[in-house]
Structure formats: structure tokens, C-alpha cells
């Protein structure tokens, strides 16, 4: 048996390395799919909450719209207002006891993270839509674009760019908070770490490794998202076609020189 | 007399209790360059926004070639393509280059092919002197340049008529000239224009008709020579006296 701290770390990695790898993979799968599905849910909820009945709409349509908005509002309040660990217990055991449904653990994990993230995303995306100046929507309508065309071509691309930092936040939160899903026996990183630690009761060494893995995951994702943001922004410089003396020339204008 | 492109009859618009337009009657014939002048809050912009259906009129009729634009007898996309608008704050699409700004309406609304849309967009960007900047994003352009791109965007739809909502009011003084220059050229080329403006010199030189609005009604409309030299209504005289004396103060060198 090893005697030093680093000796234990090496020993654990040697014997339980595969547990950490499989746990990391499950954590990444849950966090990534949960964030992506959550984004989809958030997008639908946010757009749903921007709909308004037409001016001439009857009482029934108005009522339905109110009800629909109430439903979406309730979804956000409930899933933002309760801990994910509790949501996991309620959904997983609720489905089992009252629907007779034994959800596969991984599927349950993805479902829970998705609906939880969706509630946050709905508000983040609503903020993103509001952040795009309404003048651009008016301009799009003034050249005949429909509401849908305006949303997909003008508003959402800018809204999503503006909320990229918040989407990144959600992703990182999901990597970390998916650890609570060990309560429904999802074999993610925390769950696997617990198994590894239990055998020799080396909790400190094991969770030291676990912490490093979480940190590597979140840091890489931070860098990756920054890279994606810069790609979305496009180059800071642009090409100026033609000069005073030569109409075929091409001049690269850099950010500092370009008009602010 | 031929049917005007736009006719406005008994137009009213209220925001809550506040009546911004009360019974406006107005028309624009093909080739007209109409300048609408008046103090802030007189309803000029609201009139333009009602014509563009960015505001829903409280009551009254707006027709396009004799067809009501509010009852669905003119398809909205077609109407918007034919009657374009240039905004005070440019409202360019920030996620697109100057060229893409001028193409999106053509490809999405007029269903033109990309090559044709690009050719047409280039034509109008060159016309407003923005040819070299087609690859720039709006954030890389100055106010005057943005407004010229916005004019090209509206022109690229091959409209019958353009509405200008205070197109130079958000510009630094030295950039007003370049935009007015473009608008003078457009007027000369015979485009029908409806311009809400505080640029009295532009109205005097370029307009075929000047409309003076005050407190939600059209007080007086006439040829520019008549409005500027012999206004009939006291309210017009008062407004012109006030705004023209201010203009002189501005142009006087600081002592």
C-alpha cells in the first residue's frame, strides 16, 4: 500500500483510472446534451412568451393566450425555484411509483438537466431578444420581412451572440451540478469517485483527482466558448475595395483605423 | 388627375388619451418630393409610421394606388417592398455586412437569386458612394455612412416611393451634407419621396411640396416658395420665424 499522498494518487489512478474516465464521459454527455436540449426548450419558451394575440382576437383566443403564458411562467418559476437534486428525486421516483416507469438513469439525468436548464435559458434568451434594438425589427418589417424571417435572420443571431457568455455559464454549471444526480445513481464523475473512494477510504486523494478533472473540463470549455464567440464576431478588420488611384486595389482596414 | 400612390383620409392616431394625429388628409403623387416640417411632437413621424404600418391607425383610411392597405387587399410584403422607409437611427442589421444588409430583403421578400440580389445591391451601394465599404459591418461605419447604406438597402427593393423619417437628425453636423447630397440625387432621378425633416434649406431647394404640421393636423401645404416666402397661416409664420432665426444663430461665427 502507498504511504505518501502522491503515492496514493498514483495508485488510485492506476487502479480506478477507468472509473474516472467513464464518469467524465457520462458527466460530459449529461452536461452537453442537457445544455443543448435546455437551450432548445428555452428558445421555444422565450419565443412563446413573446407572442401576443392579434388586435382583433376574440375572448377565447385571448384567454388561451393568457393560459399559455401562465403555464410557461409557472414552468420557469417551479424549475428555477427548486433545487435540481430535489427535482431529480421527485421526477425519478415519481415516475417509478405513480407511472410504474423505471426511467433509465442516463435518460432521467438528461431529462432533468434539460428541463432545469430550459427554465434558466428561457429567461436568458428573453433577455437576449430584448437586447436587440427594436429598430432593427421595424426595419426588417419595413422591407416586407415576416415576423419569422425577422426573428431567424436578424434578431436571434444577434440575441444568441449577446447571450453566449450566459450560455457558457449554464454549460459550466451543468458540468458541476450534474454531480447531484448521484442521488438517482447516474454513474457520472462524482458517483464514480464515491465508488473509487469507498474501497480504501481514501476520500481526500480521490476527490483531489476529481476536483482537478472538473477544473480541466470547465476551463477547456471556457476557452472553447471564447473561441466560438470570436468566430461569431467575425474579423475586426474589413476589406476596402478600390482606392483613389486604382479601382482594383484592395485595402485591409484594421479596427483602430475603422470608424467607430 | 391620376390616382396618387398614397392617399391618407381622416387619419387619426391616439396613444392612450393622447391624440397625436387628428384628422390628417394627405396625398402623394408619383414623382412628388414632399417635405413634412413642424415642431417636435407635431405628429410628423407618427404620420410616416402609420403610412408604413409600423403604427396601427386608430381610424381613417390609407390607400395605395386606391387600394386600402389595412383590410388585406394589398399583400403586406408587396406593399412594404414598394414603399420603403429610412429611419432616423439607421436601423441597419448589425449581424450583416453592408452588402448583406442590401441583399436580405431581395432574397427573402422578393425571392431573387443571390447573384441578382448582389448585383442590384452593388448598383445602389455604388450610387450612394458606399461601394468600397460593402464588406464592412455597421459597427465599423460612421453615422453618415450607415445612413447611406440604409438608403441603399431601401433602394435595393426597387421601391416606388421612399419614406424618410428625420434621416439626418441623428448625425454629426459634418455628416449631414453627405446624406442630403444622396437624397438630392434621388429626388433629381424622379423617385417619389416623403421626407420628415428639420433641414429647411433641403425642403426649400428640393421639395415639390412642403407640408407644415402642428398639433396633429396639417396646417398648411404648398409649393416651397410659397410656404417659405408667404406662409398664409400664422402658426406656419411663427414656426418658420423661430426655426430660421435659430439657423442663423448657428451659422454665425462664435465671438
Image: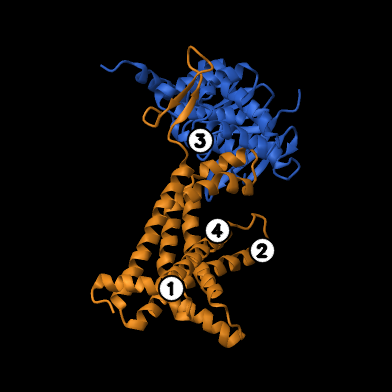
Chain colours: A orange, B blue
- Discs 1, 2: same chain: yes
**Cα–Cα gap, marks 1 and 2:** 55 Å
Mark in the foreground, 1 or 3: 1
Question: Marks 4 and 1, Cα distance to the nearest angstrom?
Answer: 36 Å
- Residue position for label 3: B42
In the drawing, what numbered circle is on residue A19?
A: 1
Name the outermost residue toward the top.
A245
Element type where label 3 sits in the image: loop
Binning the other alpha carbons within 10 Å of mark 3 as few (below 14), some (14 to 19) or many (20 upward) gives some
Nearest to viewer (mark 4 / mark 1): 1
For residue A43, the mark is 4
Tell me which label, 1 or 2, sits earlier in the chain. Answer: 1
Give the left or right position of residue B68, taking residue B123 as reference: right
Q: Which element type, helix, strand or loop, lies under badge 1?
A: helix
Q: Is residue B2 left or right of residue A82?
A: right
Query: For this view, does B49 lie left or right of residue B39?
Result: right
Amino acid at each position: 500500500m502507498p504511504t505518501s499522498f502522491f503515492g496514493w494518487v498514483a495508485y488510485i489512478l492506476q487502479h480506478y483510472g477507468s472509473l474516472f474516465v467513464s464518469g467524465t464521459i457520462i458527466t460530459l454527455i449529461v452536461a452537453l446534451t442537457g445544455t443543448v436540449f435546455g437551450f432548445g426548450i428555452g428558445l421555444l419558451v422565450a419565443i412563446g412568451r413573446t407572442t401576443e394575440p392579434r388586435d382583433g382576437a376574440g375572448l377565447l383566443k385571448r384567454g388561451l393566450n393568457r393560459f399559455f403564458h401562465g403555464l410557461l411562467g409557472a414552468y420557469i418559476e417551479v424549475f428555477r425555484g427548486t433545487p435540481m437534486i430535489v427535482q431529480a428525486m421527485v421526477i425519478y421516483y415519481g415516475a417509478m411509483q405513480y407511472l410504474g416507469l423505471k426511467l433509465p438513469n442516463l435518460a432521467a439525468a438528461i431529462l432533468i438537466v434539460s428541463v432545469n436548464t430550459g427554465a434558466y435559458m428561457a429567461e436568458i434568451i428573453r433577455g437576449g431578444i430584448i437586447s436587440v434594438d427594436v429598430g432593427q425589427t421595424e426595419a426588417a418589417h419595413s422591407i416586407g420581412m415576416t415576423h419569422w424571417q425577422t426573428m431567424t435572420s436578424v434578431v436571434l443571431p444577434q440575441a444568441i451572440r449577446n447571450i453566449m457568455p450566459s450560455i457558457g455559464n449554464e454549460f459550466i454549471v451543468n458540468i458541476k451540478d450534474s454531480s447531484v444526480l448521484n442521488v438517482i445513481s447516474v454513474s457520472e464523475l462524482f458517483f464514480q469517485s464515491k465508488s473509487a473512494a469507498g474501497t480504501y477510504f481514501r476520500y481526500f486523494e480521490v476527490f483531489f483527482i476529481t476536483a482537478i478533472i472538473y477544473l480541466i473540463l470547465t476551463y477547456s470549455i471556457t476557452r472553447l466558448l471564447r473561441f466560438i464567440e470570436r468566430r461569431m464576431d467575425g474579423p475586426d478588420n474589413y476589406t476596402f475595395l478600390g482606392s483613389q488611384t486604382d479601382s482594383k486595389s484592395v485595402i485591409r482596414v484594421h479596427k483602430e483605423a475603422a470608424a467607430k | 388627375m391620376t390616382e396618387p400612390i398614397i392617399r391618407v383620409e381622416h387619419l387619426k392616431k391616439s396613444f392612450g388619451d393622447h391624440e397625436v394625429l387628428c384628422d390628417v388628409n394627405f396625398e402623394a403623387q408619383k414623382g412628388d418630393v414632399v417635405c413634412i416640417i413642424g415642431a417636435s411632437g407635431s405628429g410628423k413621424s407618427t404620420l410616416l409610421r402609420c403610412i408604413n404600418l409600423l403604427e396601427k391607425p386608430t381610424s381613417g383610411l390609407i390607400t395605395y394606388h386606391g387600394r386600402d392597405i389595412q383590410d388585406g387587399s394589398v399583400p403586406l410584403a408587396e406593399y412594404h417592398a414598394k414603399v420603403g422607409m429610412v429611419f432616423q437611427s439607421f436601423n441597419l442589421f448589425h449581424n450583416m455586412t453592408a452588402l448583406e444588409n442590401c441583399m436580405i430583403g431581395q432574397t427573402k421578400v422578393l425571392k431573387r437569386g443571390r447573384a441578382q440580389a448582389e448585383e442590384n445591391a452593388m448598383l445602389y451601394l455604388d450610387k450612394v458612394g458606399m461601394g468600397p465599404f460593402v464588406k464592412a459591418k455597421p459597427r465599423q461605419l460612421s453615422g453618415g455612412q450607415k445612413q447611406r447604406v440604409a438608403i441603399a438597402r431601401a433602394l435595393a427593393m426597387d421601391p416606388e416611393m421612399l419614406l424618410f423619417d428625420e434621416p439626418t437628425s441623428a448625425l454629426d453636423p459634418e455628416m449631414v451634407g453627405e446624406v442630403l447630397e444622396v437624397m438630392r440625387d434621388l429626388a433629381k432621378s424622379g423617385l417619389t419621396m416623403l421626407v420628415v425633416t428639420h433641414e429647411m434649406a433641403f425642403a426649400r431647394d428640393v421639395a415639390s411640396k412642403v407640408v407644415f404640421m402642428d398639433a396633429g393636423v396639417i396646417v398648411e401645404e404648398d409649393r416651397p416658395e410659397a410656404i417659405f416666402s408667404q406662409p398664409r397661416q400664422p402658426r406656419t409664420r411663427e414656426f418658420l420665424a423661430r426655426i430660421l432665426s435659430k439657423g442663423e444663430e448657428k451659422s454665425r461665427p462664435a465671438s
